Image: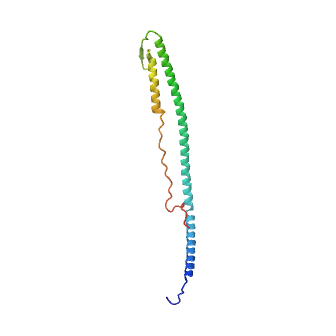
Amino acid sequence: MPDGATVLTPDQHIAALSQLAQLLNQRIDTLNAQLAAERAPLHAKYVEALSAQYDEQIALMQATAQLYKWQNFASTVMMWTVVAVVCAGLLFSGYQLYFSVRRDKPMDGDLELSAQRLKLTSSVVGVVILAMSIAFVLIFVDKVYTITPTAPAAVAAPIAPSGSPIQEPRK
């Protein structure tokens, strides 16, 4: 041991290390406070941008829900319109078939085709209307009324960069 050196007891070593740890913790807290003060404007902008992103996602989800409600209403109206048209076609074809059978003689068929109009006069007009009505329903159900769900838009989750002001300082 060198001359003039004081020998510390274990309790004195523990007390000295405790004081040193307190000084280091105070310095760490001071540096973290300075760092937070420097990053405060950046943190405010980051939170503002994150809030705007969430607001946009909420608006997109609400618009999607409103669009679905409108499409559901419109498709219901279209479906009932198609049902009305098909029922009218069925009634008219039934009317045509009934009166062609009620007459004991077959009607002469006549087909007139021009640029302005198409004219068909025959006992099979009812069958043609019936076929058109069935084709109309099948095309409507296959091409228009079918609901095809789409995948939701991919939304990127916000990721805080390393050293971000969002991270809490260690204590």
- Let me know if residue 117 appears in the view: no
Which of 150/18 is in front? Answer: 18
Residue 105, percent across and down?
A: 44, 9
Q: Position of residue 87 (x, y in %)?
A: 51, 23
User: What residue is at 46 percent from the left and 18 percent from the top?
Assistant: 126
Seen at 52% across and 33% down, the residue is 75
Residue 100 image offset from top left, x and y in percent: 46, 13
Residue at left offset 53%, top offset 51%: 53
In the image, is residue 92 above or below residue 139? above
- Position of the C terminus, as image quadrant, is bottom right
Display coloring: rainbow
> 111 or 13, which lies in front?
13
Horizontal and vertical percent for residue 60?
53, 45
Occupied quadrant, residue 35 = bottom right
Spot the residue most to the top: 105
Q: Is residue 38 above or below residue 52?
A: below
* Furthest-bottom residue in this view: 3
Residue 71 vertical position relative to residue 84 in the rendered view, above or below: below
Q: Residue at x 46, y 27 (%)?
A: 136
Residue closest to the far front: 10
